[in-house]
């Protein structure tokens, strides 16, 4: 950590800071420049955070140098984490496709969507039973009935299930059916929910908040990790920008940036990013080519009647292309399609 002193800072201001830092068990190294003085701090950064340094007289800025997240940082973790979802690996040398309906609507629709997911090369089935909707009048999901449908489809197809939980109070129930718990974009900073999924003993898919920085996203993952759960997969799903041609702007650069900062796998959701069917395959191609650990896509047997996000669901005729491009590009980037 570095304290940058204001141009008019006095020797007393500097001495007071050195005294404060050393009394907190740290070391302070003062470097006097022509117009500015900086003080380099060595020691327990979390402890320095509590000293209120930025508000002390003569201080212009306090800069943190090490990452504020510890458990999910690559700094303290040499190998890349491979998350196993009922035996299906995500991360490492694997490329994993997750596919399924945006929302679970009926047993028939979910089973058919699972068949489509398989045809698209998916190893995991996605599907929401609890839907976070902008409008309180929109379809909110089937709740536990939807979870039962998912469990039944898992039984019939062997595909492990990834499903969203939107409320900390539901985590135990959702975890009793799900193989992986999803925390959606709208809940990325719902800290009570993050702690509850961290305690649930299931792998977690953590989507990036639509207005969150990468650091905020990793801090959200840190909340889960802090509960002893490092089985976390990060998902870039597009961010809010001024651009209206897409539902969200896929921040493709977030994939290598996050992969450099954390040991956790990073996947991409091209469906919620683009919001339009014809963008899903090009965005998937970009995601896999840039080295994402997987993609999660919406498929639906009849998108025109879908209760949620029909326009972004892939159709039957798109599935073989997704499977082929995933297999080909995964191989080119040194990965194996799981
Ligand atoms: C689906 O997965 C989300 O619930 C959906 O994208 C929410 O968006 P909307 O409620 O604005 O349609
Ligand atoms: C979803 O995947 O069902 C979903 C709600 O996505 P997001 O949180 O990215 O909007």
Image (cartoon, rainbow, N blue to C red):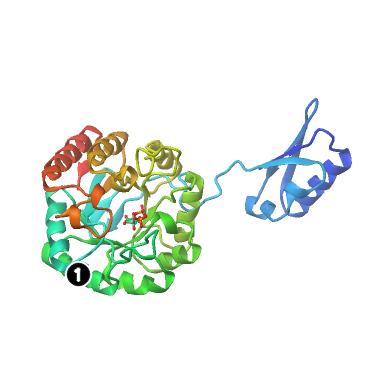
Q: Is residue 158 visible?
A: no
Q: Give the percent coordinates (x, y) of residue 153.
A: 15, 66
Q: Quadrant of the N terminus?
A: top right
Asked whether, in this view, residue 49 is left or right of residue 239, the answer is: right
Asked whether, in this view, residue 26 is left or right of residue 310, the answer is: right
Instruction: State which image quarter holds ligand 1.
Output: bottom left
Asked whether, in this view, residue 320 is left or right of residue 334, the answer is: left
Residue at left offset 13%, top offset 53%: 116
Q: Give the percent coordinates (x, y) of residue 237.
A: 36, 47
Q: Residue furthest top?
A: 34
Number of dots carrying numbers: 1
Asked if 41 appears above or below 134 in the picture, the reply is: above
For label 1, the SS is helix
> Label 1, on which residue?
149
Residue 115 lies in what quarter of the image? bottom left
Front one among 1 and 8: 8
Residue at left offset 41%, top offset 37%: 243
Residue 259 lies in what quarter of the image? top left
């Amino acid at each position: 950590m570095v304290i940058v002193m204001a141009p008019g800072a006095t020797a007393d201001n500097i001495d007071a800071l050195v005294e404060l830092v050393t009394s907190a068990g740290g070391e302070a190294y003062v470097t006097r420049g022509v117009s500015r003085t900086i003080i380099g701090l060595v020691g327990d950064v979390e402890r320095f955070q509590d000293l209120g340094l930025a508000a002390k007289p003569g201080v212009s800025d306090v800069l943190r140098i090490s990452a504020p997240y510890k458990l999910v940082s690559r700094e303290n973790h040499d190998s890349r984490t491979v998350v196993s979802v009922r035996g299906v690996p995500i991360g490492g040398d694997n490329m994993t496709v997750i596919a399924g309906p945006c929302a679970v609507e009926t047993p028939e629709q979910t089973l058919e969507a699972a068949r489509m997911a398989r045809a698209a090369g998916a190893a995991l089935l996605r599907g929401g039973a609890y839907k976070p909707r902008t409008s309180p009048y929109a379809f909110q999901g089937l709740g536990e009935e939807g979870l039962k449908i998912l469990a039944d489809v898992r039984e019939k197809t062997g595909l492990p299930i990834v499903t969203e939980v939107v409320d900390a109070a539901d985590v135990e129930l959702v975890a009793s059916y799900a193989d992986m718990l999803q925390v959606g974009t709208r809940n990325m900073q719902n800290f009570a929910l993050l702690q509850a999924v961290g305690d649930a003993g299931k792998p977690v898919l953590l989507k990036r908040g639509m207005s969150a920085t990468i650091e905020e996203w990793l801090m959200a993952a840190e909340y889960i990790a802090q509960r002893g759960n490092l089985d976390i997969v990060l998902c870039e799903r597009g961010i809010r920008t001024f651009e209206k041609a897409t539902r969200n702007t896929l921040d493709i650069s977030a994939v290598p940036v996050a992969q450099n900062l954390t040991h956790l796998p990073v996947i991409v959701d091209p469906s919620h990013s683009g919001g339009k069917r014809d963008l899903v395959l090009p965005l998937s191609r970009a995601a896999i080519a840039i080295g994402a650990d997987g993609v999660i896509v919406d498929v639906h047997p009849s998108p025109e009647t879908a209760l949620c996000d029909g326009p972004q669901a892939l159709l039957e005729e798109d599935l073989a292309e997704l499977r082929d491009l995933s297999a080909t590009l995964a191989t080119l980037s040194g990965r194996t399609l799981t």
